[in-house]
Image (tube, rainbow, N blue to C red):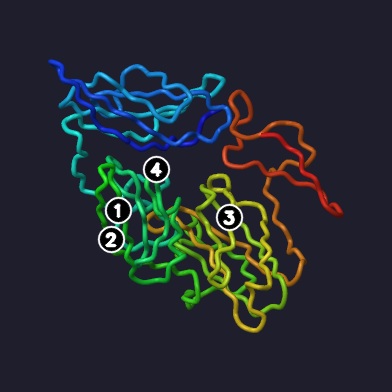
């Protein structure tokens, strides 16, 4: 199997000095065990340059290991990998640093950073930023930290005992009202001391009653968004409205050029109800439906449906939505099927397969005739 879970750890003991000519030190690493049932052991890597390690040190199936015979006065960098019962080895964990100069951790300038990317790339200082949608807010650096307690506007939010130290994965900023908020982190260090850091940021989400005045009445067969060769006036979101309806409502739509499963989020009257699935590049999806429960639908006043691209801003990704309509009750509007959809049954394999089909990189679309009652779908991946 391919090991995907990130190894989490905490550097627990920095230094033990022995009275020798070249003073020696030891560093003890501790980490949280991976949850995969077939993990057989862990390897420890270290070196005097970041991400430049010597050969692996087998640590066994344990959650701690002491590296001996280090030179006092030198800085060392450590990382871990996990090995499964088939001998497959994971990638490196996040890196931790130890400076073998004293038994006290070095002072770090901790800060809260903001990124819109799951790999935390292109991070900015959170302070004075305006955020929207899903974001990644995290502590940096991670060295010498044993625990971080996050709070929002003075109310405890979550506690992280292992790196990376995040405020949610990701944090949904729509859970906060629009306006200014203070996010704080109580940082507990390995020497028992604490630091408290705070950042003030603004939340700006246009997904509730603050719907654009030019919302599009349903049904709306035209396409909107940031579309190549089409509408490019709705880069961030497309807002629709429809009259009050009693009972459950079926929402039908199709989307264009959706690259990520968390890219296009759908809101009904300010409540998030799901994400649009991905599509092929520069391609429209087939017709898709979503049942809106009566508890979310106004029966006597105007309703709003908003499709929001969670990556815009700060980006200006291409995307689009079209053929949006609603129907009362359990009825289902006409469905637009992808061109080239594969009729079922389909014994052949499709996707982005080594030595096989590579023409369906993002999705595989199938179709089958109407059937009464429950239906069992069989497949392998």
- Secondary structure beneath label 2: strand
SS at circle 1: strand
Q: Nearer the viewer, mark 4 or mark 1?
A: 4
Q: Residue at x 55, y 33 (%)?
A: 36
CA distance separating discs 4 and 2 = 21 Å
Tell us which disc is closer to us: 3 or 4: 4
Residue 146: numbered disc: none
- Disc 4 to disc 2: CB gap under 8 Å: no
Q: Which is nearer the eye, 71 or 349?
A: 71
Q: Earlier in the sequence, mark 2 or mark 1?
A: 1
Residue 20 locus on image (x, y percent): 15, 17
Task: Please state which of the two labelled residues, at mark 4 or mark 2, is closer to the viewer.
Answer: 4
The residue furthest bottom is 300
Comparing 214 with 93, the one in front is 93
Please tell me how crowded label 3 is: few (under 14), some (14-19), or many (20+) other residues with Cα within 10 Å: many
Q: Earlier in the sequence, mark 4 or mark 1?
A: 1
Q: Which one is in front, 84 or 230? A: 84
Q: Quadrant of the N terminus?
A: top right
Which residue is denoted by mark 4 in the rendering? Answer: 162
Q: Which residue is mark 1?
A: 112
Q: Find residue 252 and report its image quarter.
A: bottom right
Q: Residues within 10 Å of mark 4 (few under 14, many from 20)?
A: some
Sequence-first disc among 3 and 4: 4
| Closer mark to the observer between disc 1 and disc 3 | 1
Q: Measured from the top left, where is residue 269 in percent x and y?
A: 56, 73
Q: Name the residue tied to disc 2.
A: 199
Foreground mark, 2 or 3?
2
Q: Label 3 belongs to which residue?
A: 276
Helix, strand or loop at mark 3 = loop
């Amino acid at each position: 199997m391919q090991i995907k879970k990130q190894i989490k750890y905490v550097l627990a003991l920095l230094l033990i000095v022995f009275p020798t000519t070249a003073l020696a030190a030891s560093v003890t690493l501790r980490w949280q065990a991976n949850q995969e049932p077939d993990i057989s052991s862990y390897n420890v890597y270290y070196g005097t340059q970041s991400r430049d390690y010597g050969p692996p040190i087998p640590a066994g199936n344990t959650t701690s290991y002491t590296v001996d015979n280090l030179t006092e006065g030198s800085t060392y960098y450590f990382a871990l990998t996990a090995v499964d019962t088939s001998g497959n080895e994971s990638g490196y964990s996040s890196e931790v640093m130890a400076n073998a100069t004293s038994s006290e951790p070095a002072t770090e300038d901790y800060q809260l950073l903001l990124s819109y990317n799951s790999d935390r790339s292109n991070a900015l200082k959170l302070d004075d930023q305006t955020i929207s949608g899903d974001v990644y807010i995290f502590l940096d650096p991670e060295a010498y930290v044993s625990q971080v307690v996050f709070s929002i506007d003075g109310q405890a939010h979550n506690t992280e005992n292992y790196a990376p130290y995040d405020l949610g994965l990701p944090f949904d900023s729509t859970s906060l009202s629009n306006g200014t908020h203070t996010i704080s982190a109580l940082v507990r260090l390995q020497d028992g001391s604490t630091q408290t850091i705070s950042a003030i940021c603004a939340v700006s989400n246009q997904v509730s009653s603050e719907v654009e005045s030019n919302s599009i009445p349903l049904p709306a067969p035209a396409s909107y968004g940031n579309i190549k060769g089409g509408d490019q006036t709705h880069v961030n979101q497309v807002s629709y409205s429809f009259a009050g309806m009693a009972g459950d409502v079926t929402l039908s739509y199709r989307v264009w050029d959706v690259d990520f499963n968390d890219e296009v989020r759908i809101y009904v009257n300010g409540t998030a109800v799901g994400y649009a699935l991905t599509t092929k590049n520069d391609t429209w999806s087939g017709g898709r439906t979503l049942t809106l429960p009566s508890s979310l639908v106004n029966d006597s006043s105007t309703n709003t449906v908003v499709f929001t691209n969670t990556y815009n801003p700060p980006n200006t990704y291409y995307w689009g939505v079209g053929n949006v309509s609603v129907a009362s009750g359990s009825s289902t509007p006409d469905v637009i099927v992808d061109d080239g959809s594969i009729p079922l049954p389909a014994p052949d394999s499709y996707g982005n397969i080594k030595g096989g089909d590579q023409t369906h990189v993002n999705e595989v679309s199938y179709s089958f005739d109407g059937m009464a009652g429950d239906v069992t779908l069989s497949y392998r991946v």
